[in-house]
Image (cartoon, rainbow, N blue to C red):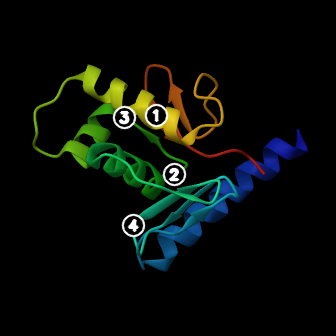
Amino acid sequence: SLSVLLAKVRRILTRLEREGAGEGPVPYDDGHLRWDPNADRFWVDGSELTLPAMEHRLLRYCLEHRGKVLTKRELFAGVWGDAITGEGTLTVHVRRLRTRIEPDPDQPTYLRTVRGRGYLFEGPIP
C-alpha cells in the first residue's frame, strides 16, 4: 500500500541522513518517546525516563541503529561488550525496557522481535 511504501522511504531517508551526516547519533522524537543523544537522556510522554545502566545502554544502542535488525550477537557486543552473558539476560532486559517505553508491552511498536534474527527498533509509523 502507499502508506507502507511512504514509511519505508522515510526510514531509508532517515538512515541516509544519519550515515551522511557523520556527526554522530540523530535525536529521536515521535511525541511519545524522545532521545537527546547529546545529553544521553530519554523521555516518555514528556517525563524524563531514568533507566538502569544496561537498559539505558540497550535503548541507546537500539536508537543509534534504528531501522536495522540487530542480531543477538550484535547486541551482546554493542551493549555488554566483553562481559559474559547469556541469551536469557538479553530477553529479560528487552522485556523490562518494553514495559518502560511501549504503550502496550505485549504488542511492541518500538522494540520488535524479528523471529530467528534478533530485534528491530523502528518506532511507530506516523
**Residue type beneath disc 3:** Thr
Q: Which numbered disc covers residue 119?
A: 1
Between label 1 and label 3, give the one nearer the viewer.
1
Q: Say which residue label 2 marks.
A: 66
Number of residues whose C-alpha sits closer than 10 Å to that of mark 2, classed few (under 14), some (14–19) or many (20 or more): many
Identify whether 18 is placed above or below 119. below
Q: Is residue 126 above or below residue 74?
A: below
State if disc 3 and disc 1 touch (CB < 8 Å): no
Structural crowding at the residue carrying mark 3, measured as other residues with C-alpha within 10 Å and reported as few (<14), some (14–19) or many (≥20): some
Give the mark nearer the N terminus: 1 vs 4: 4
Residue drawn at point x = 75 percent, y = 50 percent: 7
Q: Residues within 10 Å of mark 1 (few under 14, many from 20)?
A: many
Q: Position of residue 15 (x, y in %)?
A: 56, 61
- 14 over 75 or under it: above or below: below
Tag 2 near tag 4, CB within 8 Å: no
Residue position marked by numbered label 4 in the rendering: 40
CB under 8 Å between callouts 1 and 4?
no
In the rendered structure, which amino acid carries the disc numbered 2?
Arg
**Mark positioned earlier in the residue sequence (1 or 3):** 3
